[in-house]
Amino acid sequence: MSTASSESVAADPYFQELFADRIGGNKYGKDTEIYKFEKIKRAKRKALADHPDRKLLDFGIGENDSMADSAVREVMRQEIDKTENRGYADNGVGEYKEAAARFMQRNFGVELDPASQINHCIGSKPAYAMLPAVFINPGDVTLMTVPGYPVAGTHTRYYGGDVFKLPLLPENGFLPDLDAVPDDIYRRAKLLVINYPNSPTGRTAPPEFFEKVVRLAKEKQFVVVHDAAHILLTFDGPPRSFLQTPGAMDVGIEVHSMSKGYDMIGWRMGFVAGHPRIVSAFADVKDNSDSGQFIATQKAAAAALDDDSIPQRIREKYRRRMEKLVAVLKDCGFECEMPGGTYFLYTKAPTGTESGETFAKAEDATRHLIEQFGIVTVPWDDAGSYLRFSVTYVAETEADEDALMQETKRRLSDAALVF
């Protein structure tokens, strides 16, 4: 190849200077930082290459391991062939909104007008991407808990806003310390995003916490967005909606997902519920962002919402698996207890091994466990060093679960971790 052609291959395209600053500007594509989950994927590939006969014990998967209920799939089969379902759904069909309203009343005693207080979303993730467009101007602040789901914060920055991080610490029961937020931050705050049962800590919020959030929202004048994705995977009592809290409907919304509680991970369905003016504003942004989820999918999801036996079965399955995992990890030296909810177990990362290896952060422990012992976890170093174990591993029967737990215990014992 000639020098001239080599130079043309190496040269940046003209549009390298055109990338928006929000995604890196003219440095886009040149960042050498590797995303956490890409590091995990690379460590998994190395483990498989070095030990092709050793099965990976994958506790890193953050999605349900089962298909949606057969009755829900049957509704989908019927609805997919109906001519009236072929078109754009825009801001949703009445059947799904009405089912969501029934679900909220039946499970939480929350009365909602399906026409004005509920709007569907194509999974909860797009809702968190769109809500900053409703409220954030340059210089405004979104209060976000960390560790946590970053999407609302990412889009806050896209609009020129700032993110103020609220660390979730064990000394605060993994609840944000809202009293520690400086007054100048509160003066700029437009949104508070909270998530209970919390991913990844597994903490549930007591009623008093939600009551305090409502009082603060009215006093400081910000909007509350409650991420309720794991609400149906509550283990320590009845599931609790933020909207059950007196006054909550005056200050915010709650975002629900069909994924965790209904095994509908890939179906991309959820709903936003709460104050009608906020729901309306969300619907306006959404109307300029997508054309709605396939109507047949909405009708199948409505059938799921009307069947409380589905989330009950899913909850009991993950409760059973979580109890087994907690017992195994405790036997192997981890400091952990049954979480209040979610299918995630959040536990302090080991600091090294008896043989003398040291882990400066959770990411180092994760890589060691994957490469040396074929055990996959997800590291969190945002507020201390923690590992996240998920009980969404693939196991067809309870006997398969028990066998996997026995193998996990054997490998962790061999790892000889210190804490």
Image: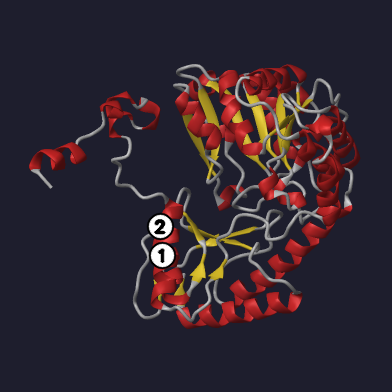
Q: Quadrant of residue 337?
A: bottom right
Q: Evaluate whether residue 290 shows in this view.
A: yes
Near-viewer residue (68 or 144): 68
How packed is label 2: few (under 14 Cα within 10 Å), some, or many (20 or more)? some
Q: Position of residue 169 (x, y in %)?
A: 54, 49
Q: Is residue 405 left or right of residue 159?
A: right
Count up the numbered dots. 2
Q: Evaluate whether residue 365 shows in this view.
A: no
Q: Position of residue 97 (x, y in %)?
A: 82, 30
* 87 relative to 199, above or below: above
Residue at x 68%, y 60% (from the top left corner)? 65
Residue at x 46%, y 27% (from the top left corner)? 157
Near-viewer residue (100 or 390): 100
Residue at x 40%, y 59% (from the top left corner)? 361
Q: Position of residue 392 (x, y in %)?
A: 65, 62
Amino acid type at mark 2? Lys
Residue 152 is labelled as: none
Residue 39 is labelled as: 2
Q: Is residue 316 left or right of residue 59?
A: right
Near-viewer residue (194 or 279): 279
Q: Are marks 1 and 2 in contact (CB under 8 Å)?
A: yes
Q: Helix, strand or loop at disc 2?
A: helix
Residue 43 is labelled as: 1
Q: Quadrant of residue 2?
A: top left
